[in-house]
């Protein structure tokens, strides 16, 4: 793996969504962690989404979090504290 984090300033000019991240060594049995560039997973909806549907989607996301974590490692980061408006 190659540390590409030095490209973050250029990529941030394209979009502020790009952030510095780390691939933990254990993920791919590497000798050490690797710095990288990440884009957060964000579930997005339109402003005019039905409020009941938004509640059902949010409730389902949190109720099914354990199952999501089994197939999508990033789901471990789902929390009320990390939620955004």
Image (spheres, helix red, strand yellow):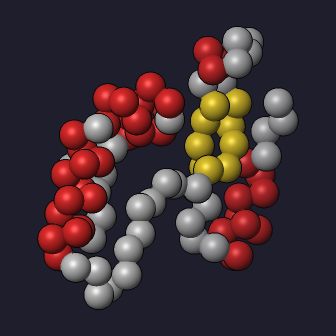
Question: 80 or 7: which is nearer to us?
Answer: 80
For the image, the number of numbered tags is 0
Percent x, y of residue 44: 41, 69
Report the side of 30 relative to 65 (left or right): right
Q: Quadrant of residue 28?
A: top right
Q: Name the image quarter holding the C terminus.
A: bottom left
Q: Residue at x 24, y 44 (%)?
A: 62
Question: 1 or 45: which is nearer to us?
Answer: 45
Q: Residue furthest right?
A: 2
Q: Residue at x 78, y 57 (%)?
A: 7
Q: Is residue 74 above or below residue 83?
A: above
Q: Is residue 32 above or below residue 13?
A: above
Question: 27 or 56: which is nearer to us?
Answer: 56
Q: Residue at x 76, y 68 (%)?
A: 10
Percent x, y of residue 8: 71, 58
Q: Name the image quarter holding the N terminus.
A: top right
């Amino acid at each position: 793996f190659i540390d590409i984090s030095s490209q973050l300033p250029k990529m941030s000019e394209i979009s502020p969504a790009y952030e510095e991240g780390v691939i933990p060594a254990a993920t791919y049995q590497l000798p050490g962690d690797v710095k990288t560039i990440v884009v957060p997973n964000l579930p997005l909806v339109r402003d005019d989404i039905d409020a009941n549907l938004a509640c059902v989607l949010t409730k389902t996301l949190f109720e099914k979090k354990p199952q999501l974590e089994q197939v999508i490692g990033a789901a471990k980061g789902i929390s009320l504290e990390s939620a955004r408006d």
